[in-house]
Image: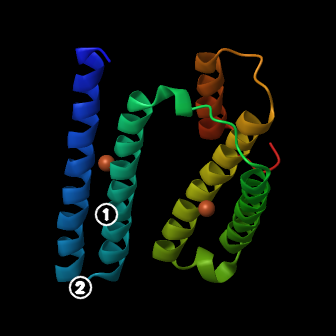
């Protein structure tokens, strides 16, 4: 492994650690706060920071073991991903219904969070769908082209069924 790659691995692990510490600091702020909206949203940022910590760690591992990135997936896992895709789709439908509910429309803080959830679930749905395609369809693209597609489609066309 080249020393530049080793540096990058080290960098990712440092970022991973930073995100974890930041998540803890945010938790502390949540603990001190009395405002429910602030508590809920800072808690969400804290959980996201833990998520980011895991993603940095994953990138470090991918650079360490590049041969495992496109490892073949078991039937079991593929079946489970299909179930998760459906669960995400149901969540999206449910949240869209909520956005049309008069009780939600007249509670701006609640509506704000429902919209936040909808964005997340649309993204989850699109991401899982793309990952599913990635593990079942033999790719006709280069790995680089493939992941660029996963990224763009999950970001900009995050609609169930789409
Ligand atoms: Fe972050
Ligand atoms: Fe989700």
Q: Position of residue 33 (x, y in %)?
A: 21, 80
Q: Is residue 82 left or right of residue 60?
A: right
Q: Which residue is mark 2?
A: 34
Residue shown at 77%/17% (left/top)?
A: 140
For marks 2 and 1, the one nearer the N-term is: 2
Residue shown at 50%/66% (left/top)?
A: 112
SS assignment at label 2: loop
161 to 143, vertically: above or below: below
Q: Position of residue 151 (x, y in %)?
A: 58, 32
User: On the image, which quarter does residue 48 sit in?
Assistant: bottom left
28 to 5, vertically: above or below: below
118 to 40, vertically: above or below: above
Residue shown at 68%/74% (left/top)?
A: 98
Between label 2 and label 1, give the one nearer the viewer.
1
Quarter containing the N terminus: top left
The crowding category of the residue bearing disc 2, from other C-alpha atoms within 10 Å (few below 14, some 14 to 19, many at least 20), is: few
Counting the numbered discs, the total is 2
Residue shown at 49%/73% (left/top)?
A: 108
User: On the image, which quarter does residue 76 sit in?
Assistant: bottom right
C-beta proximity under 8 Å, tags 2 and 1: no
User: On the image, which quarter does residue 91 sit in?
Assistant: bottom right
Q: Position of residue 5 (x, y in %)?
A: 30, 20
The Cα atoms of the two marked residues, 2 and 1, are separated by: 17 Å
Picture quadrant of ligand 2: bottom right
Q: Nearer the viewer, residue 108 or 80?
A: 80
**Disc number placed over residue 46 in the picture, else none:** 1
Q: Nearer the viewer, residue 88 or 58?
A: 58
Visible in this render: residue 154? yes
């Amino acid at each position: 492994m080249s020393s530049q790659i080793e540096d990058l691995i080290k960098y990712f692990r440092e970022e991973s650690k930073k995100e974890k510490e930041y998540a803890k600091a945010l938790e502390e702020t949540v603990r001190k706060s009395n405002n429910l909206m602030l508590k809920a949203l800072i808690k969400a940022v804290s959980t996201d920071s833990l998520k980011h910590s895991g993603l940095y760690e994953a990138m470090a591992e991918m650079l360490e073991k590049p041969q495992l990135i496109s490892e073949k997936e078991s039937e079991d896992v593929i079946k489970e991903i299909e179930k998760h895709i459906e669960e995400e789709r149901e969540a999206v439908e449910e949240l869209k219904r909520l956005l049309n509910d008069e009780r939600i429309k007249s509670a701006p803080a609640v509506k704000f969070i429902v919209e936040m959830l909808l964005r997340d679930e649309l993204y989850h749905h699109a991401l899982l769908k793309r990952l599913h395609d990635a593990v079942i369809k033999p790719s006709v693209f280069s790995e680089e082209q493939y992941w660029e597609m996963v990224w763009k489609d999950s970001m900009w066309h995050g609609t169930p069924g789409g």
